[in-house]
Image: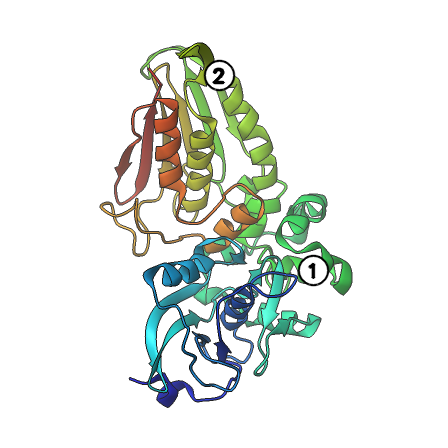
Amino acid sequence: MDLAETLGTQESAWLEFKRTPKREGKRGDAIGNAVCAMANDLCGRGGGDILVGVDDQGMPVDDVDLSDRALLQLTEIRDSGLILDRPSLTVERAVYRGRPVVRLHVTASATPPVRFDGVIWVRPGPTTRKASREDERVLTERRRAKDLPFDTRPLELARLDDLDLDVFRQSYLPSMVAPDVIEENGRPVELQLSSLHLTTPAGTPTTLGVLAVGLDPTSQVPGAYVQFVRYQGTDLDAPIADEQELRQNLVGLSARLEPLLRSNLRTRLVEDGFRETPRPDYPLEALRELCMNALMHRNYETSYAPTRIVWFDDRIEITNPGGPFGQVRDDNFDRVTDYRNPSLAAALKGLGYVNRFGRGIGRVRRALEDNGNPPAEFQVDDSSWVVVIRRAA
């Protein structure tokens, strides 16, 4: 089917033409801005399309790159972590006015506003621009609790006093929103909280708000903590050397978790030719990735069990409530990505605790191999997820 018959031949709020996917402007990728705007869907059309290989007059060009590599580079926009919350995006070859083009179809986000590199972009007509304060209010109020994942639903018993606004202003907001946007628009804190999905438009804290900047997350989400146990031996009957419960919000939790993991690592010297190279018994990068992915993907809604890190003399076991979700199954979890908590995933990316989406298991495997550890062992069932990593020989 020729897309001109269904999409039209002129740019609109839901159709944009791009001659090439090249980077443009001070803030980066014009394609990324357009994807963000389509996901925000200010006009309420359900999303929109970006056609690459079409000029401003709506005519296909001759030099459009249709290679697999070009399509993969465009798909990377979705997974790079620059667009938060992560949009639903498909990239495919298509026909427009009888000529080949690349089509990016963006589905409207269920959790607007969406940001690209910390900025909210909208498309009220045939041009893409930064959102105004009123645009942001409209997008924020469009969300409906019944349609949302658990992490952005309101916690009816929570109040604004349950959130640490100092942590929000000093750590969370600067991580999620571009500095020039914070400086130029002067939005009140209530709108900032709601815009970032930490509260509803009416001011009730959401699950994400309590997890990210709550004074005591477990007061509203009982399982929202990490239990760490260090055994002096290789089984559960061994003496306990250390036991801690980490009950802080995401910002405080990361501040405690990394030094805790570092303090339990042991490093030895390994001969490398004429040199001796220090090698830890576990790569910190792999531990960090596994712990943060556990917090990202766990089931906060129906399980009160904590995320558990159990450290034996010969291995570490990380256990998480919540089995495969969405399109993920126990036989494809290392290749397919889906998100039980999409706004929480966005928060972890914005705070710098997750580097990219859909790359965690690959990073863990490479880090273990480079450090000389055996491959990670995954145990996935309908209600839980366990990973075991063994000490380097």
Rendering coords of residue 102 (x, y %): 38, 72
Q: Measuring 51% from the left and 28% from the top, which residue is drawn there?
A: 245
Q: Taking 382 as reference, is 106 above or below it?
A: below
Tally of numbered tags:
2
Q: Is residue 155 left or right of residue 318?
A: right
Residue linked to disc 2: 242
Element type at marker 2? Answer: strand
Element type at marker 1? Answer: helix
Observer-nearest of 65 and 179: 65
Q: Taking 382 as reference, is 203 above or below it?
A: below
Rendering coords of residue 30 (x, y %): 56, 67
Rendering coords of residue 320 (x, y %): 37, 37
Q: Quadrant of the C terminus?
A: top left
Residue linked to disc 1: 190
Q: Taking 232 as reference, is 189 above or below it?
A: below
Q: Amino acid at mark 2?
A: Asp
Q: Measuring 36% from the left and 59% from the top, which residue is drawn there?
A: 69
